[in-house]
């Protein structure tokens, strides 16, 4: 017998608060712009009605949201005016991630995201905003029992033992700080601030500010503007560091039989469960800054949504790890993958293409800027040999490796990415060549492990090598048929 349950009241509080946050700023703009300088209490009638409607709608949404489950299915009903009922068989549930925000931790509850096979990438099939820990454990137990009915052992006891398994990887306080410092993210903070300020067009006189900035620039105040811009960028960088430290605090990775469990977060605790069967590949990211310290980032290509808040299909396994530890950690989680491979370099005739490629789009703007800002603008010409040098570094970093069951592609220099893909996980391999590449007997290899997911590519591979990689996958397809 299925018992219908309601979410904890903290779900109503957080839901109403989230909706109020979304409407308060537009309402403030409407009140200020509509008053035209002559404020009247009548101007508050419509905003107050909107606020009242938002609060009432949030309360009714919480009242009308119910959920429950039996031995085989999870059932959710929601909707104030139009009722929506969803029934999800347990065998379709592919992953469960648990989040503990500030309000959830104060109330002793958690937020549960349930991902199913075939759901939209980046979106959870069902989200339970506030559920007790005991209910989550019961739900996980029932899902395990439904999937492992053939086993004689008690899945509940196995679940408890797995929860106590020692971590395969953790981040120390020093590593959390180093991961935050080297993660960057300043430009994303600037973009978020700019998006916020763009909503205040009626309150901030942007045209007057732009005229003042232009007058200061023309009046030889360029150093002043440059210093202000640098200070703003450093402030954004500081905010990004704090955000990343909060995100990566208490980071730990455990393997529980056929599931990789990742926990992280300080203010908001999050637990992500990644079934090993849904891992499509492994990616190693090495930014130029982290390479100086011998560190890298490891992420998993996951056939599903954005389980840990990142892009769909990408789950961070190790935010920061010494490169010599990467192979052992990945092998402990995913024994099928071989990270100790020998890469084939690109042919020598591809070097000139890598050197010239950044110059194609830098040449004209750099020359124009150097001419307009002469004589000091002549220093910008140093950008051109620097770009050519970076092209050479990208050429030396690129490569590929092939074994009987795995394809590995590596590219990039500022952010070098190495992608390991099992043969049975590959969805497609594309070999393409432009007219210029054909003249040099070169080609581009692109490999995808999901139909609409992550792909990797290496440009200017030897044409015969690219054809060999293509035949390698074609042979597998012929064997299957």
Image (cartoon, rainbow, N blue to C red):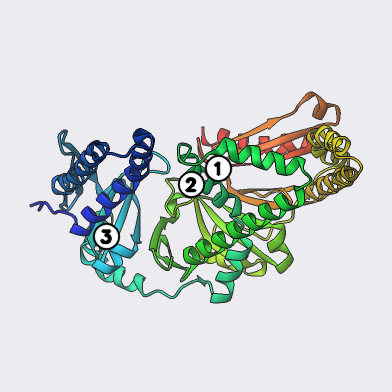
Q: Name the residue beneath numbered marker 1.
A: 454
Q: Name the residue beneath numbered marker 2.
A: 313
Q: For residue 54, say whether it is visible.
A: yes
> Which-is-in-front pick, marks 3 and 2?
2
Identify the image quadrant of residue 423: top right
Q: CA distance from mark 3 to mark 1?
A: 29 Å
Q: CA distance from mark 2 to mark 1?
A: 7 Å
Q: Name the residue beneath numbered marker 3.
A: 140
Q: Residue furthest left?
A: 1
Height in image: 343 above or below 270?
Answer: above
Q: What kind of element bears circle 3?
A: helix
Height in image: 22 above or below 3?
Answer: above
Q: Residue furthest front?
A: 38
Label 2 near label 3: C-beta < 8 Å?
no
Label 1 near label 2: C-beta < 8 Å?
yes
Which one is earlier in the sequence, the residue at label 3 or at label 1?
3
In x, y percent, where is residue 196?
47, 45
Q: CA distance from mark 3 to mark 2?
A: 23 Å
- Which residue is at the front of the view, 132 or 218? 218
Q: For residue 149, say whether it is visible.
A: no
In x, y percent, where is residue 103?
29, 63
Q: Residue at x 72, y 58 (%)?
A: 288
- Which residue is at the front of the view, 468 or 157? 157
């Amino acid at each position: 017998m299925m018992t219908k349950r309601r979410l904890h009241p903290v779900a109503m509080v957080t839901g109403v608060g989230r909706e109020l946050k979304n409407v308060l700023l537009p309402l403030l703009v409407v009140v200020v712009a509509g008053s035209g300088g002559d404020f009247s209490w009548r101007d508050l009638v419509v905003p107050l009605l909107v606020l009242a409607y938002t609060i009432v709608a949030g309360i009714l949404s919480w009242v009308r949201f119910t959920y429950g489950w039996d031995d085989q299915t999870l059932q959710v009903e929601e909707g104030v005016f139009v009722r929506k009922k969803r029934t999800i068989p347990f065998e379709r549930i592919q992953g469960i991630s648990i989040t503990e925000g500030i309000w959830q931790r104060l109330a002793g509850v958690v937020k549960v995201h349930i991902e199913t096979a075939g759901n939209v990438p980046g979106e959870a099939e069902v989200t339970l905003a506030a559920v007790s820990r005991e209910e989550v454990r019961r739900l996980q137990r029932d899902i395990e029992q439904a999937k492992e009915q053939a086993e004689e052992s008690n899945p509940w006891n196995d679940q408890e033992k797995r929860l106590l398994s020692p971590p395969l990887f953790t981040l120390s306080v020093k590593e959390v700080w180093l991961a935050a410092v080297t993660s960057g993210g300043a430009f994303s903070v600037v973009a978020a601030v700019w998006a916020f300020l763009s909503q205040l067009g009626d309150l901030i006189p942007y045209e007057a500010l732009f005229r003042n900035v232009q007058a200061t620039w023309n009046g030889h105040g360029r150093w002043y503007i440059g210093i202000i811009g640098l200070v703003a960028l450093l402030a954004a960088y500081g905010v990004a560091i704090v955000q990343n430290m909060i995100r990566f605090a208490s980071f730990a990775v455990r393997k529980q039989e056929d599931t990789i469990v990742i926990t992280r977060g300080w203010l908001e605790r999050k637990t992500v469960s990644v079934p090993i069967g849904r891992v499509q590949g492994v990616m190693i990211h090495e930014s130029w800054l982290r390479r100086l310290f011998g560190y890298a980032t490891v992420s998993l290509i996951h056939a599903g949504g954005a389980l840990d808040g990142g892009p769909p299909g990408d789950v961070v396994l190790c935010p920061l790890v010494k490169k010599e530890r990467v192979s052992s950690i990945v092998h402990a989680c995913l024994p099928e993958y071989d990270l100790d491979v020998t890469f084939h370099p690109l042919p020598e005739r591809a070097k000139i293409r890598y050197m010239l490629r950044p110059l194609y789009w830098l040449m004209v703007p750099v020359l124009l800027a150097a001419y307009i800002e002469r004589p000091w603008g002549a220093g910008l010409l140093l950008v051109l040999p620097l770009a050519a040098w970076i092209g050479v570094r990208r050429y030396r970093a690129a490569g590929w490796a092939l074994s009987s069951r795995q394809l590995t592609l590596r590219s990039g220099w500022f952010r070098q990415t190495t992608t390991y893909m099992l043969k049975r996980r590959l969805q497609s391999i594309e070999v393409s060549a432009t007219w210029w590449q054909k003249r040099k007997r070169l080609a581009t290899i692109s490999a995808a492990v999901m139909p609409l997911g992550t792909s990797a590519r290496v440009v200017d591979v030897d044409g015969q090598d690219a054809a060999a990689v293509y035949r390698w996958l074609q042979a597998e397809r012929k064997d299957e048929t």
